[in-house]
Image (cartoon, grey):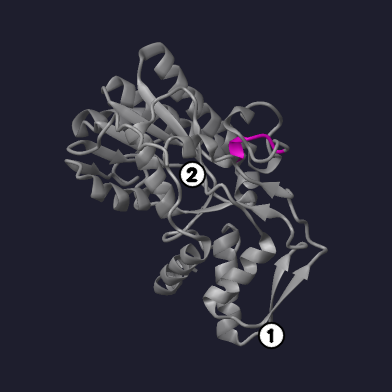
């Protein structure tokens, strides 16, 4: 077994700001950070500080004086939203990244971790996707606006490190799920969409549940609590120019995923496929080698994680719908 990595930036006693603390990743980070004994976990709502407003961000950070900053905050949405509002997705995410990173520099933040997305990688990147695949090919057109803003955030962290010596790092998570996920019927991602569909089928006593396509595409998933644990780990042990993939390192077919969701939900009907619908990219798996070399591995298996997500959905079905 490899030696545990050296902790170069302990969070004990630090004032830590989670920008975007109400989101799925942000709330998971708050839960995880409570175990690090920080002096304070700083939280601010968008009603209190608009992260798109540089003066508001700078003013709040001058008063709050965070020492460490996590930046999961972002404007997010599905393919339809990205395609319908490209200017909003590009502008708002650019402003969030630029304002928080620049203000962190100006107010002397000791360390910052910017959170990107696996959509930063080229549409046809070799599998599994290594970090060096960035900017080696065209993006997926349906979410390129969001991806370009996230790439800009990575490059801002690298630029402030290079020009000003700031310890700003970036992490790129895979497909995430868990408590606080988006269950909107039109723009949720695959796991919450399947949970919602299977739960509806169970409650209605349906004979079957349908998925789009052949069910053969492979996708990688990571529970939000595992993601938060990995981000805290990176904040403590990693410093460097290059971004780091955050993923499980394994993938499953959509059919395997759907059948596991059905088992977790308790729906024992048939699974059918509408093969007239598109499959999308055959495979999307990120390399986890860099993160594993830094001493982190996931702790939540897919079935266990899906059961946790379903429990949350049952408790919050009214507002999640």
**Who's the residue at 58% across and 57% down the image?**
189
Total marks shown come to 2
Residue that appears at 35% across and 30% down: 112
Quick one: label 2, few (<14), some, or many (20+) residues within 10 Å? Answer: some
Quadrant for residue 1, please give it. Answer: top left
| Corner quadrant of residue 125 | top right
Magenta span: chief secondary structure: loop
Please provide percent x and percent y for residue 226: 42, 51
| Residue 275 left/right relative to 16 | right
Q: Position of residue 251 (x, y in %)?
A: 62, 53
The residue singled out by tag 1 in the image is: 207
Is any atom of residue 92 visible in this view?
Answer: no
Q: Is residue 101 magenta?
A: no
Specify which label sits upstream in the sequence, 1 or 2.
Answer: 2
In the displayed structure, would residue 274 be above or below residue 107? below
Left or right: 229, with 39 as reference point:
right
What is the distance, in whole Å, between disc 1 and disc 2 at their CAs? 38 Å
Residue bounds of the magenta highlight: 119-123
- Disc assigned to residue 96: none
Which residue does the numbered mark 2 point to in the structure image? Answer: 75
Residue extending furthest front?
Answer: 1
């Amino acid at each position: 077994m490899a030696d545990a990595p050296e902790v170069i930036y302990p969070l004990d006693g630090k004032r830590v700001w989670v920008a975007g603390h109400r989101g799925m990743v942000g709330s998971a980070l708050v839960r995880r950070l409570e175990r690090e004994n920080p002096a304070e976990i700083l939280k601010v709502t968008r009603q209190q500080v608009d992260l798109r407003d540089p003066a508001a961000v700078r003013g709040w950070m001058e008063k709050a004086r965070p020492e460490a900053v996590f930046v999961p905050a972002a404007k997010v949405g599905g393919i339809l939203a990205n395609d319908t509002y490209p200017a909003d997705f590009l502008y708002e995410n650019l402003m969030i990244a630029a304002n928080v990173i620049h203000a962190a520099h100006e107010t002397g933040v000791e360390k910052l971790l910017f959170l990107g997305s696996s959509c930063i990688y080229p549409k046809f990147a070799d599998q599994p996707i290594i970090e060096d695949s960035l900017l080696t090919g065209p993006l997926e057109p349906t979410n390129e606006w969001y991806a370009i803003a996230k790439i800009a955030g990575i490059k801002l962290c690298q630029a402030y490190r290079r020009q000003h010596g700031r310890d700003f790092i970036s992490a790129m998570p895979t497909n995430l799920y868990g408590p606080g996920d988006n269950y909107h019927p039109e723009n949720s991602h695959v796991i919450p969409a399947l949970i919602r569909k299977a739960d509806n089928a169970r409650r209605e006593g349906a004979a079957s549940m349908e998925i789009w396509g052949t069910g053969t595409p492979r996708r990688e998933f990571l529970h939000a609590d595992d993601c938060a644990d990995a981000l805290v780990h990176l904040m403590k042990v990693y410093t460097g120019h290059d971004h780091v993939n955050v993923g499980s390192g394994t993938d499953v077919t959509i059919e395997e995923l759907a059948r596991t969701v059905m088992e977790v939900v308790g729906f024992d009907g048939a699974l059918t496929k509408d093969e007239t619908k598109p499959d999308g990219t055959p495979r999307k798996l990120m390399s986890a080698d860099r993160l594993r070399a830094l001493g982190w591995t996931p702790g939540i298996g897919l079935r266990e994680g899906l059961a946790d997500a379903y429990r949350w959905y049952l408790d919050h079905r009214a507002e999640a719908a």
